[in-house]
Image (tube, helix red, strand yellow):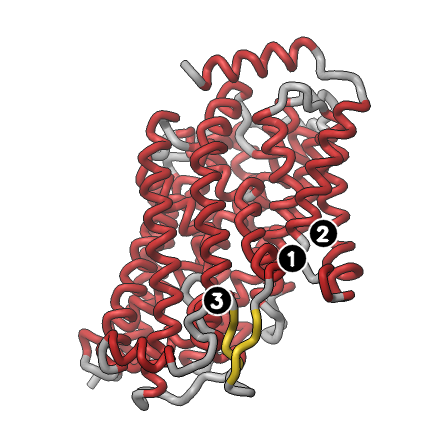
Amino acid sequence: MITSQTLIMMTIGAYLIFMIAVGFYFTRKNNNVSDFYLGGRQLGPFVTAMSAEASDMSSWLLMGLPGVAYLTGICDAAWTAIGLAIGTYINWLVIAKRVRVYTSRTNAITLPDFFSKRYKDDKNLLNLIAAVIIIIFFIPYTASGFAACGKLFSSLFGVDYVGAMVISAVVIVAYTALGGFFAASTTDFIQSIIMTVALVVVLGYGVTSAGGFDTVMANAKELSGYLSLNAMHDFSTDSSVEYGLISKISTLAWGLGYFGMPHVLLRFMAIEDKEKLKMSRRIATVWVVISLSVAIFIGIVGYGMTQAGAFEFLEGSSAETVIVVIAKLISACGPLAAIVAGLILAGILAATMSTADSQLLAASSSVAQNILRDFFKINISEKGSMIVARLAVIAISVVAVFLATNPDSSVFEIVSFAWAGFGATFGPLVICALFWKRSNKQGAMAGLIAGAVTIFVWKYAVRPMGGALNIYELLPAFILALVVNIAVSLMTAPPSEEVKAEYDAYVEALHA
């Protein structure tokens, strides 16, 4: 008789094989580097929306958020979700269409490429700085995704962490290197569906196991601060801890990160028709709001299941495995249920992979396209460029795998730092490039450097001081980078007439 664990492994295995098959399918669609990195700007509105959000959320949606809600109540998780939801909507509303139009006019296929062409940087120094920033923050970000996959398999099946992590990395590298942007976007779309199924099934089973919705809420209300937006519950003292204004502002600042996320902005650049972005915005916003809300409620339901005796109380970081624990309970309900549990666990894997593949593609484009071809002016044929692009994916993956060999590394800490890095460096520059004609090359470079330096200084020197300075590094770094960009632009010569004319043409095309 086939055990439930075997059925789970078979389901996950089938999912991984299917992802590689998608990569093989899209190999023939990559005729040049534009296809490989941007899909030839042919994405439909639904795939654009769902792939953007799947690549954005990562395993944090199915592990981190429910875990925080389970352990402390809705406050911290809700303020984070509110910041992300607002950031998502504003990004689609005010950034998406402008990025699509401007990058299309300049024929830019990567974000650093756009910066260089926007400011007519003939020496491609701006291109180089932006590419280096992407590599600095994306390689450890990708490593965190590999690590999350390794931890999931290791905790589920008791297998060696490094072996599980390497196998996961090989699968991600395979379909990304083979199919490029088309494969990454299509698999992200599929993975968003699997993530949605996982959330719905876990929620339904969890509420039933906990004794119904009323019982879940009754258990939560008994805990001081558990359902408050102004306090968190502390199980060690069985009391509430105030969640002050600084904490709320710091948490909401996560939403600023969207303006500078290369793997999200690439989706805006790749949609086939700018007019379809409105539909994509609606799809993306609805999915994000619902999925974040359900993920938080699953944490509350998980506590209700603990009270009902379904499983032991999850302490510390183990709270992040609440969906994994629920999936294991589901798997005990029969063969079909075990397959469903496999899909749920594949959903967690999907959340991680959908982010890692997009990050891998963005990082490899920085090496192959922005540094080798654009900055060092290495003349490579289209066929040669495709080979270099795929080799870059593999090379960056090897470095990321090496960084991920430590199973005790904090996935959340890495993600938080990398998110801040991109948000504070690229975010202000994207805003200035799209909305301010007077912005110039000197201001752009100064802003990039100021944002990157501030992230490190605030994270490791200022924030540890505590008190009012204990603010997520993204917020002060974002503000400083924006101020520096504006100040330096105003103190130096205005952009050339050619740059101004192209900006005016972009604005005209935007409203055409």
Please give the name of the residue rendered at 63% of the width and 19% of the height, measured from the top-left corner: 437
Q: Amino acid at mark 1?
A: Tyr
10 Å crowding of disc 2: few (<14), some (14-19), many (20+): many
The answer to whether the residues at label 3 and label 2 have Cβ atoms under 8 Å apart is no
Q: Is residue 348 left or right of residue 247?
A: left
Of labels 3 and 2, earlier in sequence is: 3
Foreground label between 1 and 3: 3
Element assignment for label 2: helix
Of labels 2 and 1, earlier in sequence is: 2
Where, quadrant-wise, is the C terminus in this rendering? top left
Where, quadrant-wise, is the N terminus in this rendering? bottom left
Q: Amino acid at mark 2?
A: Ile
Q: Is residue 207 visible?
A: yes
Gap between marks 2 and 1 measured at Cα: 9 Å
- Depth order, front residue of 122/452: 452
Judging by the rendered image, the residue that carries numbered circle 1 is 472
Instruction: Give the label on residue 75, or none.
Output: 3
Foreground label between 2 and 1: 1
Q: Position of residue 22 (x, y in %)?
A: 34, 48
Element assignment for label 1: loop
Please give the name of the residue rendered at 59% of the width and 55% of the height, measured from the top-left corner: 249
10 Å crowding of disc 1: few (<14), some (14-19), many (20+): many
Q: Position of residue 10 (x, y in %)?
A: 29, 71
Please give the name of the residue rendered at 35% of the width and 70% of the height, measured from the top-left corner: 298
Q: Is residue 217 left or right of residue 360?
A: left
Instruction: Give the label on residue 508, or none.
Output: none
